[in-house]
Amino acid sequence: MSYTVTLKSSGKKFQIKPSQTILEAATIAGINIPFGCGDGMCGACKGQLLEGDVMLEGYQESALTEEERSDGLILCCKALATDNIIINIRGDEVDEGDEVDRVKVVSVRVETVEKLNQDIIRMILKLQDNEKLKFKAGQYLEFIMDDDSRRAFSLANPPHENLLELHLKLIKDGKFTQFVFEKMQEKSIHRIEIPIGQFCLRESDKPIIFVAGGTGFAPIKSIIEDMIFNKIKRPIFLYRGVNNFEDLYMHDLPFLWKKDIDDFTYIPVSENKSKDNNQLRIGLVHEAILEDFQSLKNTQVYCCGTPGLVKTSFEAFIKKGLPEDEFFADGFPFVTQKNN
Ligand code: FES
């Protein structure tokens, strides 16, 4: 059994199973719905229910107040359809056009595996069977593992390159880490599903603040390199948040970008002091932004990292004047948990 979700402004429709959230079903259908934490904490996926009914639970009051709920607002990351529904979501008027392929399963070969620091590896994949692929900078893919479970990773390269670059964080004794070391050797072949997600650059002249926590740097790298390739000239502030200086992989790359982007500022922020780099800013990355900007009213923010980082940033930046619809985010747990 499934229901139909209709997006009011664009008229786009997709099917939803009773066990799926609106966000999950839209993602599988290749339809972009803005979201942040993916877990009912930030409110970034808010939409208006116009017709039909949903079941909505397991979210925080700060993400959706009782008043908003009674006004018909819902959280797409938590709402399960119990009927055919019509909703309004922000950004629905943005037509993604035909620039992106629909989500599909393809084979890839591991070309290279390279260690970038103590626990991050960079993997380069190539499509097999002369397969061609159109994706948008900032989207992600899912590995389909031997037991059919999945792991999601953001694409770190711009779409014009004929390869797929991933940044993988290895976790000691983790299932996927074992899979990487045992199965993902160079030249091995795997199945992936691609392209997924809506963490993409939106048209505007406003300065951009990128907030990258850990390997949240990957989709932001893809977007910035795509902007350079397409000669998109907007002021960019790149804030990277890490626990320690040693976690700043590819730390030299943003300094190279400065040559290609007229107005580019790179601010790495470490939670802990380092004996190897006493120049580094110490603290929390979102707090550094709050300190540096008197108001965020005329900016766009793109944030990728843990749900905690997304939630905290969203709440703090809205208070600092950022319009809600100028915050775009990719929360790790949504992409890593939804199929595991
Ligand atoms: S509340 Fe839905 S994405 Fe954060």
Image: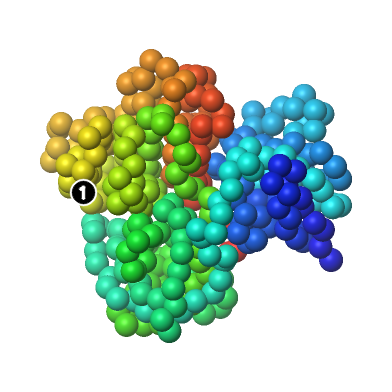
Q: Quadrant of residue 283?
A: top left
Q: Position of residue 17 (x, y in %)?
A: 77, 61
Q: Which residue is mark 1?
A: 253
What residue do we see at 80% from left, 33% from top? 72
Find residue 88 and report its horizontal and vertical position in percent: 72, 39
Position of 267 with respect to 5 (left or right) is left
Q: Looking at the picture, how far across and down is residue 25, in whole percent?
A: 68, 57
Judge by depth and name the residue closer to the eye, 25 or 122: 25
Quarter holding the N terminus is: bottom right
Q: Is mark 1 within 8 Å of ligand 1?
A: no
Decide if residue 274 is in sight here. yes
* Total marks placed: 1
The residue at 81%/62% (across/down) is 2
Task: Give the structural element (helix, strand or loop) at label 1.
Answer: helix
Q: Is residue 24 left or right of residue 249?
A: right
Residue 197, placed above or below residue 212: below
Q: Residue furthest top?
A: 294
| Above or below, 72 relative to 335 | above
Q: Type of residue at label 1? A: Leu
Q: Quadrant of the C terminus?
A: bottom right
Where residue 18 sits in the image (x, y, percent)?
Answer: 79, 58
Q: How is the image coloured?
A: rainbow
**Is residue 19 in view from this perspective?**
no
Quadrant of the image occupied by residue 272 = top left
Q: Is residue 116 above or below residue 282?
A: below
Pick whichever, 126 or 65, lies toward us. 126
Question: Badge 1: few (under 14), some or many (20 or more) residues near its Cα, within 10 Å?
Answer: few
Q: Residue at x 32, y 21 (%)?
A: 292
